[in-house]
Image: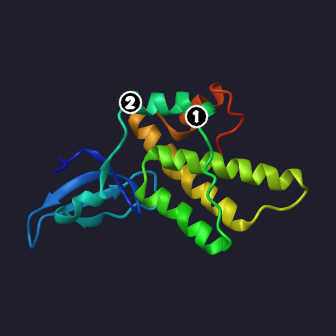
Amino acid sequence: MYQVGEYIVHPGQGVCKVDEIVDQPQETYMLLPVGARHPMRISFPVASEGRLRPVLTKAEAEELIGEYPQMDVDGFTERSAALEEEHFKNQIRRGTCRDSVRVVKTFRKRIAEVRARNKKPPVAYERILKQASERSLAELAIALDVTPDDVRLLFESQGEEDFSLN
């Protein structure tokens, strides 16, 4: 069971802080999403806590940032753009921070390839990149106790020209 004050990752909301644990009518976590413009407390049943996961440790976050330059992109493709988008969104929602960072790298590469052909990348590519970037930056920032902008700078120090949304 998670404790009040701990940071966890909610599949839909991303990084949240356990604000309170309510006992009645059933045990429920009261979660406060981190980094949201207008955060609202959300309730999540303790009985379903298997869908939650803890935020990375500082050591895991540093290791992940260090591995980024050698990280492989995800080669998943599907005939239907909608099925492909659903695959990557599920990785972001249900996967680890490493999965979200891999999705960022994958879509940064895909967008760069499309732009190299003087084409406009599909809106879905940019939407997936934005979601994966925000999710991974928020979790890494909490793990390292820095801001998301500081995490971007750490990626840039690894030779990544711009770990951002475009």
Q: Residue at x 45, y 46 (%)?
A: 97
Residue for badge 2: 58
Q: Quadrant of residue 52?
A: bottom left
In the rendered image, residue 112, in percent from the top left (x then y), is placed at: 78, 49
108 left or right, relative to 119? left
Q: Amino acid at mark 1?
A: Tyr
* SS of the residue under disc 1: helix
Q: Quadrant of residue 153?
A: top right
Mark 2: few/some/many CA within 10 Å (<14, 14-19, 20+): some
In the rendered image, residue 85, in percent from the top left (x then y), is placed at: 60, 67
Q: Residue at x 61, y 41 (%)?
A: 72
Q: Nearer the viewer, residue 106 or 26?
A: 106
Q: CA distance from mark 1 to mark 2?
A: 16 Å
Q: Nearer the viewer, residue 96 or 140?
A: 96
Outermost left residue:
24
31 left or right, relative to 86? left
Residue for badge 1: 68
Q: How is the image coloured?
A: rainbow
In the rendered image, residue 65, in percent from the top left (x then y), is placed at: 53, 32
